[in-house]
Amino acid sequence: MTHHIVIAGGGASGAIMAANLFRLGDGALRVTLVEASDEIGKGLAYLTTNPSHLFNVRSAQLSAFSGSPDHFDRWLAVHYPELTRNGPFVPRSIYGEYLEAALRETAPVGKLRIIRQACVGMRELENGVEVTLADGSSLPAHFAIVATGFGLKPESEGLLSNPWTDPLPENRDARVLVIGTGLTMVDTVLSLLDNGHKGKIVAVSRRGLVSQRHALHRPLQLSTADIPLGASIHYLSRWLTDLVRTHVKNGGDWRDVMDGMRPHIQTVWKNLPTESRQRFLRHAAAFWDVHRHRMPPAQATRIAAALESGQLEIVKGRFLSAERRGDRLFANVMRPGWYEPGPFKADIIYDCRGVRRRTDQELKGLVGALVESGAARLEKLGLGLEFDRNCALVNANGDASSRIFGIGPVTLGTFWESIAVPDIREQARQIAERITSGRRDVTRNSVARLP
């Protein structure tokens, strides 16, 4: 019997999920990708066409398949051999093309269907899942996977520009304000510079921290036995700081420790008490991110030059709101030591705060529909939906689904590390193995009884 899986979301997470299903499915799976946009395998991060927008991980880590770590590098050597000579950090614009190639390679003829509209609902039934589309029609499936991202509502009634979709200012002397100082800020600044922008660029964030530079290093070998799992964030932070200090004193690099921790981050996060997770988000997440999510050397050099020239300025402060006065925008920012917020004047304001934000907003799309129906619930920190350790969706009663799973940014609150390709492909492998091994149970039920 052929089993049908619906994946809601055709960005990188959805494409990697589909490719892993086909690779592990022995030709006995049929997959439907539901994606409203015209692009498969790209999403926001990979829609860019700017060659200055680089992956912040090396190409050797970008395979769609855990079992074939050199799959992307081999594809790169055939299709873009010139890029392999420019170092390990390659433009993100080519990744969608790679994922399309991975789908063509793995999908049997006639087994992949793409529906160009949004998924607006999912309902688990005894013998399957009913998936609802934007046009009101339904799809019957044995399993369904949420790969849509978290999907926050746009803020400030459109006064904040989207760095991925909104145009660059026509006036190259325009004053630009960027909310956020992470890697999305880096991409935005590089886009402006590549476009010949001459005006002042101010980037503001609570900590005023900028991502560190990548460098050659050797990850420290750590086991879970080395890490104080379940300890408070205060103790864990002190342990990590002491480990870095000792390692550097012995001639190592702090990057060795950060990358040595990487395979264990999900385990550490799952064992952190809720109060410690909250404290981490308030006090330590920004420090973690700038060391964990580093800039490729080429990007770091250009950002350093922009800071040195004074064209780019990093400001420490908390963005509160934006308003329009005549033809200018003003951002209300609370600076350290100030008793009231001060206005920052700008011609354009880009929102580059990324996905790691707790939402107090109305949830939209599929995520909102799942929560409203009780098929899902937000995890305690509000960073995403709640899933169990096997990526199975948890409903309003706290029960894990046997048929609906999640992958990528929508699982952020449960796993923390779930937005980079190495984490997404591992989730895809885990879900694919769970589904393919579960087909025996589904086979006992007649497909006629599917919704």
Image (spheres, grey):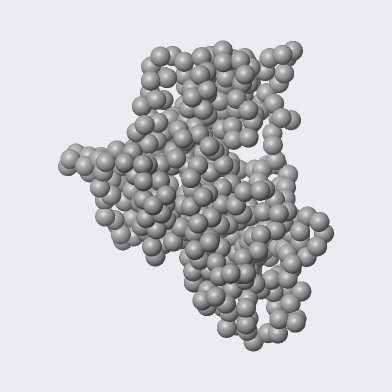
The percent coordinates of residue 439 (x first, y second) are 58, 79
Q: Residue at x 71, y 81 (%)?
A: 447
- Of the pair 54 and 241, the residue shown nearer to us: 54
In-image side of 214 versus 190 (left or right) = left
Residue 200 visible (yes or no)? no
Which residue is at the far left?
250
Q: Residue at x 38, y 16 (%)?
A: 308
**In the figure, residue 30 lies in which quadrant?**
bottom right
- Of the pair 130 and 261, the residue shown nearer to us: 130
The percent coordinates of residue 278 (x first, y second) are 53, 45
Residue 110 visible (yes or no)? yes
Q: Does 188 appear above or below 276?
A: above
- Of the pair 279 and 190, the residue shown nearer to us: 190
The percent coordinates of residue 321 (x first, y second) are 66, 25
Which residue is at the far right?
136
Q: Residue at x 69, y 26 (%)?
A: 159
